[in-house]
Image: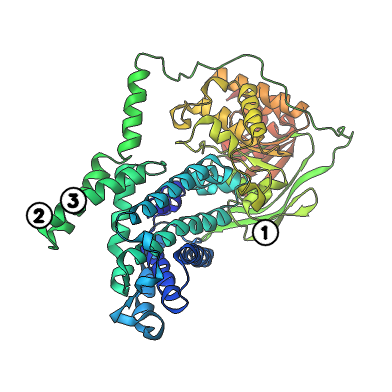
Amino acid sequence: MASGWNIISGYAGYVSLGQSAFVGLGGYTTGIIATRAHISPWWTIPIAAAVAALVAALLGVVVMRTRGHSFVIITIAFLLILQLVALNWASLTGGSTGTTLPLTSYPREWQNTPFYYVMLGLVLLSVLMTWAIRRTKFGTGLIAIREDEDKAGAVGINTPVYKVLGFAASAVLVGAAGGVYAYYLTFIDPTGMFNILYSVFTVLAVLLGGRATVWGPILGGFLIELLREQTNVHFGASSLNLVIFGALMAAVVLFLPRGILPTAAAWFVGRRTRGVPGVAEGALDLRPGLALAARPEERPAESSILLAADGLVKRFGGLRAVDELSFYVREGTITGLIGPNGSGKTTAFNLIDGMMRADAGEVRFEGRRIDRLPPWERAHLGLGRTFQITRLFRQMTVLENVVAPLRSFSLAQLAAGAVAGHEVERAQELLDFVGMSRFAHAAAGTLSFGQQKLVELAQVLMLDPKVILLDEPAGGINPTLIERLVEKIRELNAMGRTFVIVEHNMPLVAELCDPVVVLARGKRIAAGSAHEIQRDPLVLDAYLGEGWTVDEAVTA
């Protein structure tokens, strides 16, 4: 159970308290088939696992649209509903009196001690499954969802499909465990099989051992079962047992939030790296980066319109953050999008890349309307985006962050196994290109803000985007990194990449951008070259207030 819960809750970050539902489904599927069809356990247990996975997938299609507490409550409700169904559908389940599995329904070798070898095999299978998932793009995608679900969508990860498949994968193991447990007990009833305490003990086991690790759930499960045996011996079935486990859960959350294995690993790494210089702002690898392949097509003399916003509107209550905004971006250009704070620049980016849905208007990419597409589909078309406050997957390594994006999506990719070697090689080349290759195996959260900006640029480039939206790329970083960033933007633009840049650094805008679009109060008030917009009265009014002349602004 713990390994299954670890997939959806440890990897993907969706906390479920309804895992006992899949124990019950597996147990009842096994019991019903065993008593009515007298099929061998070597068939009933895989069937039980498949039924649990199918039900989880169907449930996931509905509940995976929710997040946080809502998801937790729905999983508990699902558990209670199944318990009521088992209680009241007596003709199928035996109702409150339960169902006894006939001794002839399971092999003789499952009786007595050899039965535990079956359980050991199931444990090893769960370890193998969680290890294999962690090595794939699927596992990387699940962890990206846990770290920042919106950002995961922005880098091409189909978050709804990943979550549903993760939920189903977690149920496979739990359903199989329920089937084996039914044979072990030789008796199933609604209260015993759909017991919410199993879910609580499962959560505690993973938190204690370490979530999102392969061996953490196994270690935690062993320790919890050992403690349960001891408390049963000393206190019997009294409610004091629940008090002890409740206190243990509180202690784990407060004093061991990462779990035993991650805490021990961090302590060991800390001892080995003590005295080694940390990641410093000035520690950039400034070697010339590996050249990225330029786009094969030649840039036309009068480049075509690649991206267009037409009449975009976004309301927040009575406030129009974006108000009938229209502008276009030609292929191969670096377009600036500027304006005072609160003018709607970042909101416009959110509407273009799909982080928000526009109330009105259209977004077109290469002539195709995309404003109704989810973020991951826009990313697959060639639209990349960085953020004003970097949104890397902080607990993943720098290399994992760059490998995570998906340029396309298919179920075949998920079944393909480990991350392909060519993807890792490309990610390393991109890190070398931005000067961050030496930090490939550092946790992204340990980097300075400026270094995170460079890693985020490499992450976006992994999508091979046609248009890159940069939200304040120079904000909050030192001049050395700004120079490095400007250099890379120029190189990429020379290779055919198109940029739209939101920036408050006016010298940088004047140096890089042509044309420049100016926003104020959600509206476009000017567009043209940097020199032209600097002399526009509407722009002066927006930045300095009404009544300023060009000469007065220059003097000031």
Question: Looking at this view, is 348 or 402 the one in front?
Answer: 402
Q: Which residue is mark 3?
A: 247
Q: Quadrant of residue 300?
A: top right
**Residue that carries the numbered disc 1 in the rendered image:** 372
In what element is the residue under mark 3? helix
Give the residue displayed 37% in from the left and 51% down from the top: 117
Q: CA distance from mark 2 to mark 3?
A: 17 Å
Question: Which residue in the structure is indicated by mark 2?
Answer: 234
For marks 2 and 3 on the same chain, the one whose residue lies earlier in the sequence:
2
Please identify the quarter of the rendering in which residue 374 is found. Answer: bottom right
Q: Amino acid at mark 2?
A: His
The secondary element bearing badge 2 is classed as: helix
Amino acid type for the residue under numbered disc 1 = Arg
Q: Residue at x 56, y 57 (%)?
A: 160
User: Closer to the N terminus: mark 1 or mark 2?
Assistant: 2
Q: Nearer the viewer, mark 1 or mark 3?
A: 3
